[in-house]
Structures are given as C-alpha cells and as structure tokens.
Image (spheres, rainbow, N blue to C red):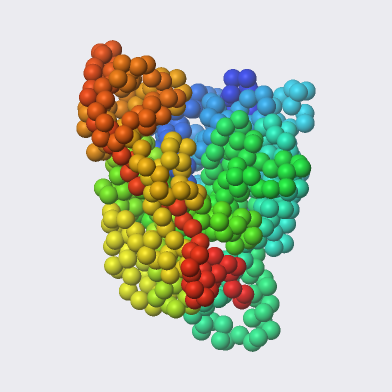
Amino acid sequence: MPPQAVRYRILPKHPGAHLFEVTCVIRAPDPAGQKLRLPAWIPGSYMIREFARHIVQLKAQSGGHAVVTQKLDKNTWQCAPVRGTLTVIYEVYAWDLSVRAAHLDGTHGFFNGTSVFLAVLGREDRAHEVEILPPEGEMYRDWQVATALKSAGAEPCGFGLYRADNYDELVDHPVEMGTFTLAQFEACGVPHDIAITGRHRCDLERLSADLKTVCEHHIKFFSEHSGRAAAARKSETQREGHASKARRREAEVRPPMDRYVFLVMAVGDGYGGLEHRASTALVCSRDDLPRKGETERSDKYRTFLGLASHEYFHTWNVKRIKPAAFSPYDLTRENYTQLLWAFEGITSYYDDLALLRAGLITVEQYLSLLGETATRVLRGSGRHKQSIAESSFDAWIKYYRQDENAPNAIVNYYAKGCLAALTLDLTIRSKTADKGSLDDVMRALWVRYGKQNIGVPENGVEQVAAEVAGADLKAFFDSAVHGTGDLPLGKLLTDFGVEQVLRASEGPSDKGGKAVKKDLPARAVLGARIAENGDARLTQVYDGGAAQIAGLSAGDLVLALDGIKVTGANLEAKVATYVPGAKVKMHAFRRDELMEFEVVLQATPRDTCDLLLRKDAGALERGRREAWLGRISAV
Ligand code: ZN
C-alpha cells in the first residue's frame, strides 16, 4: 500500500477579513513530535518574503484533545508527540494583490501553495491532497475554481478534491476562485484555459487565438530538431527507422504538460507574472486586454502578449531547464546561482522575438521593443559596477530589494541579460556561418538537462553554447556575462542589416526604440529622477550628474529653480529651458531643513538607443536578418 497522502482542506473562511482557514490532517505523525514549516520564498521571485508572518493563529489537536505546539524558528512549528491522527488548523491572512502570495475578499480568492500550505516535514515526497471549499453563503454560490492542479474528484472548474504527487508539485499550482471569465483553446493538441478575474471587457476570442499562436510557437520551438542541436542526438536517431522517427517527432510536438492555465487578474494599473510548471499567474491593466471591435494590436495589448509569452517560455526555461542550485529548491533560504541572467534574460529575449516570428508584431515593432531594452540598460551606470552574473547571485538582496541608489549600483539581469542573449545569438550565427544559433542552444539545454530532470551546472550554459558554436566562447562569457563593459551590439547588428543609433533623450517620455530626428540640440538636464505627481521630490540622483555634483540627494524636495516655484510635473521641462552648462540656483528641503544649491546643468547623455532596419543592407545582410528574425526553419 502506498504511504498515506498528506491531506489539506482550505476554506475562504472570512472573505471580509481576508482569512483562509487551512486544516492539515497527518496520519501517524512523527512520534518525536511532528514538525511543519512554511516556505520563506516562492520560486520565480528571488526574495525572502517570510510568508509565515501571515499565519495568524495555529492550533493542533488529536483524538479530540488539544496538542501543544511550539515555534522552533520563524517558519517552523513542532507539535507535541501524539499517537493518533494529528490535525493542525491555522488561519492565513491573504491581502497581497500580487502573483506571489495570496489574496481574498468578497470578489475572489487567490493563493499560491507557498503562502498557505505548511510542509509536513519528512513527508514532502508523498502524495498531497487538498480539498478546496467555497466560502459559506448564498452570495458565493456561483464561484468556480481555476488551477492546473490535478482533480481527484473535483468537477472541471469545481470545488472539491485535488491532488499532487509531492509537496513541490502542490505549491507550484496557484489557485484562483471566484466568478472569473473563462476561455479555452488547444495548442498542439493540449488544452489551455484562460481565467480572467476582475472587471474587464476582453475580446476572449481574439485573446484565445493570439495566445494559441504564442503557445504553439514555443511548443514547436522546443520540439525542433534543426541545426546543431540535432548532433547531440544523432547516435540515438541513427538507430531508428524513418517511420518510427516520424512518429516520434509528431509525438514530441507537444508541451511538457497535459494541460495549462493562464490565471489573469485584470486591475486598473498593474503588470507582473509568475511562472509555474503548468500555469502562470498574471496581473495586468484591464486596458492591456484586447477589446471587441479593435482591429490593431495596441501597444498595451502587445505588452500583455509579451508578458504571456515570457511566462509560457519559462515552462521550459527555468521550470524544467533549471539551475542545479534549484534542483531541488530549498524554500527555507536563499538559493544562489549566477545563472538568473540565462533564465530571465534569455526568456526576455525570446518573449518578444516569438511574437515577431509568430507574426503577431512587425519587425519594426520588434526592433523598437529591443531598442527600449537597450535604452533601459544604457541609462544605469550600475551596469559598469555589477555584472549580470553578480546581479543574478545577489538578486535576493539587490535586484529584488532596490532602493534609491539602484541605478548607480545594480544592473538589471532581465534587460542586460536579454541583450547578452541577443549578442550570444548573433555571435553563434556569425561563428557558424548561420548554421547554428541560440535557438539550438536552448533546444540542446532542453534535451540534455530539462527533459532529463537534471540541474544545469553553473558553467552549463557556456558549455552548451560553445558546443553549438563549435568554438571556445570564454572571451564572450568573460566580458558579456562576468564583465561590466558595454556589449558590442552596434557592430554585430550591422552584419544583420540593423543599424544602432545612440542619441540624446527627447524628454521624460522618450523610452528609446523609436526612430526620431537625430540632430536635436542637446537639452539641459539635472541628472536625477523626479516624482511625477505632486511635489518635485528627487527619487533618484544619478552618479556624476549635475544634481549629485551640486550636493542634492534622493529624497530632497525641490521647491524653486532660480527663485521660481516648481512641481514634479514641470521641473524637468523648466530645467530644459536652460542651455547645458548654465548655472542655476535651487532651493530644497532635506528633512525639515531648507537648503540652497548651485547647480551646473549638464547636457543630456546619449543614452537612448534606436534600432532601425538598414536601408543600405545588401542581399547577404538581408538574408542573415531573415534567418535571425524570420520563422524558425522547418524540421
Ligand atoms: Zn521571467
């Protein structure tokens, strides 16, 4: 007989007080006193969040008697030894409207298992069952459930019993409950659900059609046998006949899960996503969703598709191709790896590239998005102080815990990681006469590590990339991944028919990426970020900028420029009416002390990047551009 499953029951007990009640039933508990522990972080979001702080009260009982419990550390409880079945009941406060924790009110409930299910120590490898109950009351009778957890009796979208093979699987399936909108589609024969919570007017037909296109792109991408990835499996396929090979290929063009769920929370203003093995939780602005009657894909909708594409790509890259440091996860503490740039940066590279290759955006739109990413990297001097490998390692205390000094101290391993992925892709294409690419690296990583359930060693990405390139890539990894210099993008892109233009920003709303006039006169700038609403408070002061040199600091409240009152909305524009080099007087409060500063304004740096199709590109360069940005070659 298989060992008894660990059994939970979760009830949205007081939606108004945002409290879930969780009951955990343990048969034959540890005779030395059963220990239970809540994770300190959730995979995909690399920060210690101490979810245990939201457990309001915990009680244990056995055979109708109360059992004494004791806290061993911030995340761990121990119950006194008992002979019979042990039942532990606790409440979880759920009022975090993000994809990382849990949220409950009268409109819906959402939870990640890492926020609500205490692990029964010593039994993590057993099957886990959870009975999901609706809140009590007439007003909740239309509520449904959306989750990728396997049903163990619950009707589709129904309350009832669900199961997971182990604790790790249990907490990798977020659960949504409420009166959400539901849509369904199939991608490569596998059912996909979309559940949208929150008020919205989404054109579900259009959203389903576009998401299907994105999902099928990714599924086919990782099922391809083209290029040098094939070499890795050559010996294997040589042993097979043609017919069985064809059958095997057909069978392989499917995702690594039997079902997938997009859990979407539409709010007034929001953006974020978290990847899971068979689902994703997304928060978006309701305006990001497509509306009936719209024929174009708006910039906002493209942002949403990019986010969905990003999280779906993670189904392979980080949920299955994952660093050895995450195999298995230790949910009690930081799990260090220098490879987050590969999991987030490469995924960021392919999220929008897939939209282009699948025909959902144009090449001009793609280059514009890439230009925005390059601009984001160029605008932080932290890129010269921290490498993306270091940023990955320190994500726990730096990238995820940014303060006012972040642009001066940190490099974003998503944005620079995306550019490193692009640079690596173009480098491999150049070294292999366009026969190999980063696509092949990803497929080889999938075949060697992801499919085999083996963690990627810290040098694994470099090793596989070198094999695909047929060349030593140490110099590339030393500079792009472990170094702090700028990537040689402009030079590489030229050979692929794309021109990189670096120019001065046109103003606060200029994110780069768009082709604008190149010969604007330089504007005067303060070298600081200013809160946009209300008072002119400096939120960040950039290294070496006019504000920092004059002695202004983040947090200072600027009152006047040359004796004239300023606000958050007009300070930057007022500064721009001067010429670079002009000396101005600024009054500001630091704490409650009025201070005066003499500021020598500087010229806007050339930190804005546009990427344009080269009009003078020859046939060779145009061909290379198509091989890179066009559809993936057929099997
Ligand atoms: Zn990601």
| Residue 619 visible to the viewer | yes
Measuring 28% from the left and 67% from the top, which residue is drawn there? 475
Location of the C terminus (image quadrant) = bottom right
Q: Is residue 552 above or below residue 188?
A: above
The foreground one among 588 and 99 is 588
Q: Residue at x 44, y 72 (%)?
A: 429
Q: Between residues 371 and 417, which one lies in front from this camera angle?
A: 371
| Residue 358 in the image, given as x and y percentages of width and height | 63, 61
- Left or right: residue 170 versus residue 470 is right
**Rendering quarter of residue 265:** top right
Among the 4 quarters of the image, the one containing residue 427: bottom left
Rendered location of residue 532, percent (x, y):
44, 27
Does residue 305 appear left or right of residue 345 in this picture? right
Tell me where residue 570 appears, x and y as whole percent.
42, 25
Q: In the image, what residue occupies the spot 46% across and 33% down? A: 51
Quadrant location, the N terminus: bottom right
Image quadrant of residue 281? top right
